Amino acid sequence: LRDRVAFVLSFGGHGDLPRTLQYLCTGASPGGATLPPHDYGSAIILLGVADRIVPPAQVRPLEEAILTFLHASHVDAWDKAAAEREFARAKGLAADLGEPARTLMNYVNTRDVARLGPLLLPHVGEFGGHEALSPSRAPVPPFPVYLLHGLDDNVIPAAESALLAETLRGRGGNVWRLATPMITHAEVDHSAALDSVWMLVRFWANLLSE
């Protein structure tokens, strides 16, 4: 497969996973800017490190509660009533948990990243530290790399793709990068300005010409 790839496209991707996880816990993006992170990022991190921060007997019940919350967040995009039922179920599951799982799940349910993030921060290095999970640490691809990012992305900040582009170019990579207000991490902004539309069109035109 390596010798048959024409190009690679990253849509809202990270360059360094531990750095991105740190952002989701603190809101401090690369370069020193502060952008409040989306709350489901910390919920997903908690799901991944639950076995490190709660007693073994609490791990499975906590994971079930977190998955219920994440499912509710997903359903909320098209069925508000069903989402409310699932959010209520997540709160009920939290009430049945022992401590410290109950407090952690309450932070998830109330979207309290300010309290949950610092508790997760000590664990994100071991959770995402393998170099294969961070493109900036991998060998430079021998084919063009296209990085497309939402300018105000609060799951993986746009600075991630900027730093990745800089790293790859510095090592001889062929990189095209665009950060645009037309998209967020998960959706398209239909009210974007014409120049943003044009820049996005040019980005896709260059990619499709490969």
Image: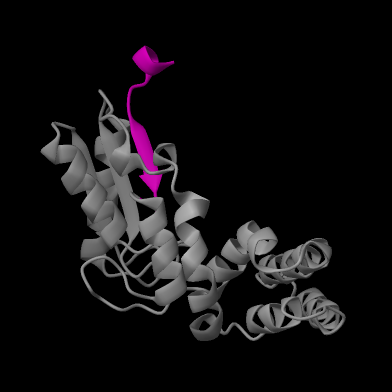
Coloration mode: one colour
Which of 64/208 is in front? 64
Residue 189 seen: no
In screen coordinates, is 23 left or right of 209? Answer: right
Disc count in the image? 0
In percent of width and height, residue 71 lies at 73, 65
Q: Is residue 2 magenta?
A: yes
| Residue span colored magenta | 1-14
* Location of residue 48 with respect to 171 vertically, above or below: below
What's the residue at 77%, 79% (across, down)?
Answer: 87
Residue 46 position within the rendered picture, expressed as x and y whole percent measured from the top left: 62, 66
Quarter of the picture containing the N terminus is: top left
Q: Is residue 135 left or right of residue 127?
A: left
Task: Name the residue: 79% across, 76% down.
Answer: 90
Judge whether residue 167 is colored magenta: no
In which image quadrant can residue 48 be found?
Answer: bottom right
Instruction: Give the percent coordinates (x, y) of residue 175.
Output: 21, 38
Residue 192 lies in quadrant: bottom left
Which residue is painted at 39% across and 40% down in the image?
131
Q: Position of residue 18 (x, y in %)?
A: 40, 55
Question: Residue 129 versus residue 175: which sits nearer the camera?
Answer: 129
* Quadrant of the rendering where the C terminus is positioned: top left
Depicted 192 relative to depicted 130: above or below: below
Observer able to see residue 35: yes
Question: In percent of the image, x 33 and y 22: which residue is there?
Answer: 6
- Taking 128 as reference, is 151 left or right? left
Residue that protrudes farthest toward the top in the picture: 3
